[in-house]
Image (cartoon, helix red, strand yellow):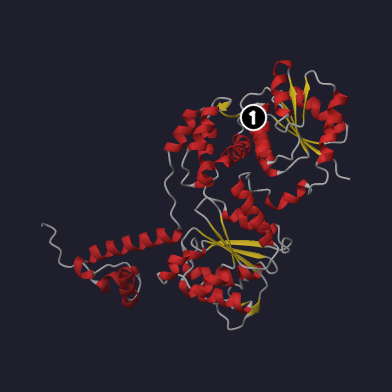
């Protein structure tokens, strides 16, 4: 029988260790943390059978922690260890749902008995490991709870699923979670960003190629679909997929087979397709950039991840989780954020969403010289926005246009010379110029002195 789990919260390391030893000796599993903020982060990862917390702690105290837990999960028993001066607060909290309280110094048998009664109440609930499928998603907001419930239902089906959301909201994390909750979880999960691979290579990456199919194809390559046989293929930024490949992907969805580059033979493939985009695909259909028939094949089930600014209650949980990881990475003894620093994080706009929050906290950890991160460091990190990283397709288009302009200026608009310098034929150069809206005549016989 599985031992009941206790989340212990106390900023006194010695007392935390003593209580842990006593609880484990009495058959409990203990997860111990040193702050209320860390406790909320841990609760987002796994649900214990009961919470035992000290009342007086730096940062979030025991009562604030109880209220935060009770708002999210009223059925989770919370027990507070309190000094005599705070007994009235604890008594009042029992009327609001606090399971119980003990005064310090506490009586060990009484504590064990209280915890046994608390964990019996939650013994009939679904095992905490039942949430293992979504363990990488740090969230406790109602919006995310609803979304994750829908995601878990969708995971049990074979329907293609489209995940929408702004950049940095965690679309690939959700896709991985859906795969882990699906009947295909024991098979591969293969992800590819359709906007990060040149169009001429994307077909080979997806569907494979045979030896000799093109220059450099020295051996057979199975491609991602065949590599994921029996599992899940995640197509990120599906809205950036070139039109010719959209036709071939539609055939895969309709017929369940792929045709590697360089052969006329098809190979059966059994995969579930999850896709994601930050683009408005309906608008792309209207403009002719995305096939409507493919859209309906991919969008059997649709889930939309809200931006971070619409789930601000998750920011303290995410911040604490990132701090735990980053302080270990940078080997810093940072216990948390100053209250005004946390308020600043919660109030920020976060156009880059969770990815930006991680970057801000990483900068703070790298530069922090105190036990808590001050608001001044957070303000600096929020101001020092890193240069925006463009998708590869966008960067390539910009380079291509600038390159053509440079050649047109150099040759004074002579297309034959542009083609020679670029190592391309004139027909291809004319097509490129048309694509970028460049007129060679504008570069001819220019009067440099006027």
User: Does 97 sit left or right of 114 as displayed?
Assistant: left
The residue positioned 31% from the left and 68% from the top of the image is 421
**Where in the figure is residue 405, as x and y percent of width and height?**
28, 63
* Nearer to me, 37 or 385: 37
Quadrant into which the N terminus falls? top right
Return the residue found at the far left: 450
- Judged from the image, the secondary structure of the residue bearing numbered disc 1 is helix
- In the displayed structure, would residue 392 be above or below residue 376? below
User: Does 347 sit left or right of 428 as displayed?
Assistant: right
User: Does 128 sit left or right of 318 as displayed?
Assistant: right
* Nearer to me, 185 or 53: 53
Q: Is residue 289 visible?
A: no
- In the displayed structure, would residue 196 be above or below residue 100? below
- In the displayed structure, would residue 136 be above or below residue 301? above
The residue positioned 54% from the left and 32% from the top of the image is 342
**Where in the figure is residue 114, as x and y percent of width and height?**
84, 30
């Amino acid at each position: 029988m599985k031992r009941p789990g206790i989340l212990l919260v106390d900023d006194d390391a010695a007392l935390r260790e003593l209580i842990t030893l006593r609880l484990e000796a009495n058959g409990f599993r203990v997860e111990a943390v040193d702050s209320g903020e860390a406790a909320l982060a841990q609760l987002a990862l796994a649900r214990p059978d009961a919470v035992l917390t000290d009342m007086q702690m730096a940062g979030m105290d025991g009562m604030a922690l109880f209220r935060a837990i009770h708002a999210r999960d009223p059925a989770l028993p919370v027990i507070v260890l309190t000094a005599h001066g705070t007994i009235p607060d604890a008594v009042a909290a029992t009327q609001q749902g606090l399971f119980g309280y003990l005064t310090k110094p506490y009586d060990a048998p009484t504590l064990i008995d209280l915890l046994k009664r608390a964990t019996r109440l939650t013994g009939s609930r679904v095992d905490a490991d039942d949430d293992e499928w979504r363990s990488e998603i740090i969230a406790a907001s109602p919006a995310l709870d609803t979304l994750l419930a829908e995601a878990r239902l969708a995971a049990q089906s074979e329907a293609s699923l489209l995940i929408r959301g702004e950049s940095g909201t965690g679309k690939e994390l959700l896709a991985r979670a859906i795969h882990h909750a699906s009947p295909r979880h024991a098979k591969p999960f293969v992800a590819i960003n359709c906007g990060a691979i040149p169009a001429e290579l994307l077909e080979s990456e997806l569907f494979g190629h045979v030896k000799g199919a093109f220059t450099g194809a020295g051996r057979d390559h199975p491609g991602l679909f065949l590599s994921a046989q029996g599992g899940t293929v995640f197509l990120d930024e599906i809205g950036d997929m070139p039109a010719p490949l959209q036709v071939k992907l539609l055939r895969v969805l309709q017929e369940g087979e792929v045709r590697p580059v360089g052969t006329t033979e098809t190979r059966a493939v059994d995969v579930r397709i999850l896709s994601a985009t930050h683009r408005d695909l309906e608008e792309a259909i209207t403009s002719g950039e995305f096939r409507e028939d493919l859209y309906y094949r991919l969008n059997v089930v649709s889930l939309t991840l809200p931006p971070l600014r619409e789930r601000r209650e998750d920011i303290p949980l995410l911040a604490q989780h990132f701090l735990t990881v980053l302080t270990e990475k940078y080997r810093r003894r940072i216990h948390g954020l100053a209250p005004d620093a946390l308020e600043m994080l919660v109030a920020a706009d976060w156009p880059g969403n969770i990815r930006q929050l991680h970057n801000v906290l990483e900068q703070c950890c790298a530069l922090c010289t105190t036990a808590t991160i001050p608001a001044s460091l957070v303000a600096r990190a929020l101001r020092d926005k890193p240069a925006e990283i463009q998708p590869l397709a966008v960067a390539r288009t910009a380079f291509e246009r600038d390159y053509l302009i440079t050649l047109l200026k150099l040759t004074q608009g002579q297309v034959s010379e542009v083609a020679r310098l670029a190592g391309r034929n004139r027909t291809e150069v004319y097509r490129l110029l048309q694509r970028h809206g460049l007129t060679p005549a504008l570069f001819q016989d220019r009067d440099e002195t006027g």
